[in-house]
Image (spheres, rainbow, N blue to C red):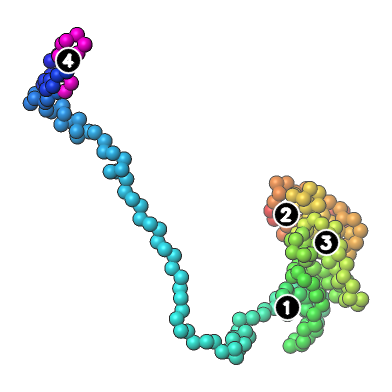
Amino acid sequence: MDRHYSGLRPITTALRGDGQDAPVGFAVTPPGMWWILLMACVRPAPPDALSTPSAPPAAQTTLELDGPPPIPDALAARLQQYLNVRSASLAALASDGSSVLITTRFGETRQIHAVQQPGGARSQLTFRDEPVSDVSLASGGQQVYYRSDEGGDENYQIFRLDLASGRTTRLTDGTSRHGGYLWNNQGDRFIYTSNARNGRDFDLYLSGPGGEGPPRRCAFGRGGGLLEPAGRLARRSTPAGRRVSLDQ
């Protein structure tokens, strides 16, 4: 026993089956005290003693107004003229400078309006549920071209409004998404981008005369990026050679 437990001695005995006494406990004598003290120092504390109870989450407070004066209806109506501010943006200028097209909101969305003289009254030309953009004049100012989607689907289409008849014609397929368009220097065709090929990549197309007829694909887009014309078609020395700058 002394060989294995230096500094320990038996303090109680029990009778074994062979009639010999057997130690059932030990008392610490000074030579073994350092071992017991060391074990007491390095023994880990129970988990409950180490854990710190987390503070309960702060209760959300609600701002409550006590006794604010009522806002008169007349004052609320008066404020509407400052809150519902409308703006007008120049959209297109007639070739002779006699009139302009603007976009402004006189309802829920921005629409095209014509102003025939400085300080003149506006005349609304389009009455769509969705806003319009990319407005241009063609055919000597007799036709208006613009982009808009239908039902908020963001599949923007290119439209032509004939001012003489008041009829609007959709020039694109009605299902694909079309980017901005630009007229060539002759003013008879325009280029635009569309994801009609696969619904993802935007290719470059050249329209037929006045936007009529099937378009001709001029370049393929890759990677799903939005390909946009960055400048007017630049005519080279021959009618068949044309260039355009693109942004992606």
Q: Is mark 2 on a helix, strand or loop?
A: loop
Q: Which residue is drawn at 43% across and 68% down?
A: 61
Instruction: Compare residues 17 and 187 and report the one nearer the observer.
Output: 17
Q: Relative to residue 1, is residue 203 depicted above or below?
A: below
Q: Residues within 10 Å of mark 2 (few under 14, many from 20)?
A: many
Q: Relative to residue 119, is residue 30 depicted above or below?
A: above
Please state which amino acid type lies under the numbered disc 2.
Leu
User: Of callouts 1 and 3, which one flags the residue occurring earlier in the amino acid sequence?
Assistant: 1
Q: What element carries label 3?
A: strand
Q: Which residue is drawn at 85% across and 58% down?
A: 173
Please state which amino acid type lies under the numbered disc 4.
Leu
User: Of callouts 3 and 4, which one flags the residue occurring earlier in the amino acid sequence?
Assistant: 4
- Span colored in magenta: 15-25
**Horizontal placement of 47 versus 160: left or right?**
left
**Horizontal placement of 39 versus 145: left or right?**
left
| Mark drawn on residue 107 | 1
Q: Name the residue under label 4.
A: 15
User: Of callouts 2 and 3, which one flags the residue occurring earlier in the amino acid sequence?
Assistant: 3
